[in-house]
Image (cartoon, grey):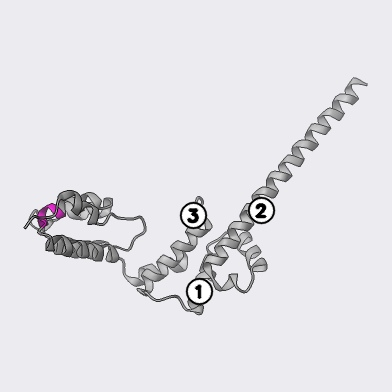
Amino acid sequence: MASMTTREATTLIPKWSAGENIGNFCKKIEAAWDYCKSENFEEEKFCKILKLQLHTDAAEVMDNMSEGDKKDVSKITKELRSRLDKQKSEYLREFSEVTKRPNEGYNEFALRIKRLYKQGTDSATVPTAGEERMMVETFLNGLPEKESSALRLMATDKECSSVDAMAKRASRCSTRQKQLQKEINAIRGDLETLENQWEGMETDQ
C-alpha cells in the first residue's frame, strides 16, 4: 500500500498562527497525525515537518527535547502543552487588564478580547448577553479615557451589547475624527495663507 507523500503531509500539518491557543494547536497536530498515520506516513518525517511549522518558542521547546522524543508526536504535544499553555486564570487576568495597542485596529482589538475570554473560560459556546456586555466593558476600559467616555455617550443599546458592534462604532468615530482634523488643518492652512497675503499687501502699501 502506497504511503502518503511528504508534500501531501505538509499540507495537513498545521502551521502556527499568531495568538493561537497552544492547546487547540496541539489538538490540530494530533488530528493531522492520526490521519497521516492511517496513510502510512513515517512519524519521524511528520515531526521534522512539524518543527518547521512552529513559532520560535515552540520550536525552542522541541530543540530542548531528547533526540528520541523529537520523533514522537505524543511526546512533542505533551511537552508543548506543559511548557507553553497558560493557565486559564492567566488568560482571564490578561483579559481584565488588556489595552488597545497603538497600531491595532478596533476590530482586531475586539477579536483579541474575545480570544482571551474564550481561552480563559475554555468556552466553545456562543457568549451570553452578560458575557457580551462584559467584553464591551473590557473593550471600553482598554481605550484612552477620552475615547472611552465619548463612546459611552454615543453608543446605542445594541452597540453596548456587542463588542463587535462597539468596535465598528469606534472605527467610524475614529475615521470621522481624522477627517475632521484634516478639514481643520486645511482651514488653518488657508487662514495662514490669507494672513500672509494680507501682510504682504500691507507691506506693499
Q: What stretch is highlighted in magenta?
A: 41-46
Q: Do the residues labelled 1 and 3 touch (CB within 8 Å)?
A: no
Please give the name of the residue rendered at 59% of the width and 70% of the height, measured from the top-left corner: 159
User: From where the camera sits, is residue 119 visible?
Assistant: yes
Figure quadrant of residue 46: bottom left
- Residue that carries the numbered disc 3 in the rendered image: 101
Label disc, if present, on residue 132 of the rendered structure: 1
Q: Label 3 amino acid?
A: Arg
**Circle 3 — which element?**
loop
Q: In this view, does 204 lie above or below 59?
A: above
Q: In the shown orientation, is residue 110 left or right of residue 177? A: left
**Principal secondary structure, stretch drawn in magenta:** helix
Q: Residues within 10 Å of mark 2 (few under 14, many from 20)?
A: few
* Mark 2 or mark 3, whichever is nearer to me: 2
Q: Residues within 10 Å of mark 3 (few under 14, many from 20)?
A: few
Label disc, if present, on residue 176 of the rendered structure: 2
Image x and y of residue 152, in percent: 63, 68
